[in-house]
Amino acid sequence: MRFPGIRKGKYYFPVTEKKSTLTADTSSKPWYIVGLDEVIVDLEIHGCPQTLLPELGLVAGESVQFSAEKISRLLARVSELGLEVHFAAGGTVANTLCNYTHLSGEPAILLGAIPELIRPGTPAFSYVAQTPKAVSLEYLVSVAGEVGIAVTCFTPDGERSFAVAPGISGNYRPEDIPEEVIRRASVVLTSVYCLANPSRPISDAAIRMMEIAHAAGVPVAFGMGTSTIVRRMHAEILDILKKYVNIAAMNAREAEALTGFSDPLLAGNALLDVTDAVLITEGARGLTMCGYTDDSVKRATRDGLHSGSIENYNQYEYSRLVLCHHCPNPVRIFTHIHPYLGGPQRLQNTSGAGDAALAAFLHDVAATRYHAESVPDSKKHSANIQFLTYSSLSRNAQYGNRVAYEVLRNNSPRLEAPIGNDKENDG
């Protein structure tokens, strides 16, 4: 397990200046996370004339549902016109898993449905070929049919128009869940996309996976979809967060759709009524995070106090997170950070920034579980408090912000190169 973020030497593991004992049986144990996702291939079409959108069945700036046959006709027409087409392995959960493996040096396991017949040159082949070997595809279920495809059409004015053909992506059943794999995971993750259509088997599978993890004490992370889906499923999502979820991740539009608050601090505070930790990406405004710590282990910030819709909201941002039900005296804590270095100078695509920030946060959650088992007598751990994170809330925001910047800078939802040094103050 690589430890989260770029650290001064004293924060790396093993911590040599402390008299901690490394247990002997953890070095070969994989500290993996598990994600259930719609197996989707992103198909990008560049240089598409605005006038072509109606012919292709697309609506400028909107997302529409397509059948597999309609996708085939679209591809044939695009090929005729000689437009640039690019296939990329996609899926919000899969992107998060890939970035987790890159950051942590640990494996991840992807659950979902994939075509039983995969031929070179097909979208499904691209999905498998582009998925790093650290993400195990061993537990995918093979199903007759076509892989899900999400089309993004870029017109010369920079507008993006979308079409989704789900294919077999929803044909993953509750009985396909590998229960022992879930119980041994460091974190499990799914998204609202898997629950968007309750008639598909993957919807029940997502609930089943969260039930198993919740019962086993494995942290459950949940990502939102588009604000349209969140608004439609408002009541169901809040119920799911309350029953199963420990970590909820979303952007500011989705947070507003879920809570009615356009201010991320107020939205995050409202969501702490139903879950333990919240991550809200705000585009050019940065990142807001909030959660719980216990009064006995709260740590005051060494930075200046900031007030917004909540007075002195960052007062205890140097605290580590604790699940609310593990807190004898829970205290809500908040932090906000502006984009790293002001954000990339050129920003063509914001896709994947939230997934990257979540991957960094899940890395920190897995790290504290690893460290607690590897160095049980470390002062990082308390006999009375079970921490959710290895680092402070402030440090998690810095780390997530830094990783999101790297994704945006490279215009790809998946990390491919090492994360460079940063100059953020440690918390």
Image: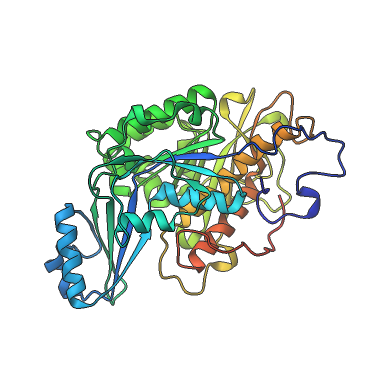
Q: Point out residue 74 in the picture as x, y percentages from the top left corner.
A: 17, 64
- Say whether residue 307 is left or right of residue 116: right
Q: Where is residue 291, by image quadrant?
A: top right
At horizontal 27% and vertical 38% (from top left) the residue drawn is 171
* Residue 222 sits in quarter: top left
Q: Residue at x 64, y 35 (%)?
A: 369
Whole-percent x and y of residue 47? 27, 76
**Residue 311 visible:** no
- Residue at 61% x, 62% y is 418
Foreground pick, 102 / 306:
102
Above or below: residue 385 compared with residue 249? above
Position of 310 relative to 246 (above/below): below
Image coordinates of residue 181 in percent, x first then y, are 50, 31
Question: Along the horizontal axis of the image, is 59 left or right of 172?
Answer: left
Query: Does residue 286 appear anywhere in the picture?
Result: yes
Q: Residue at x 50, y 68 (%)?
A: 410
x, y (%) of residue 159? 29, 69
Which of 41 and 253 lies nearest the eye of the viewer? 41
Residue closest to the eye, 263 or 72: 72
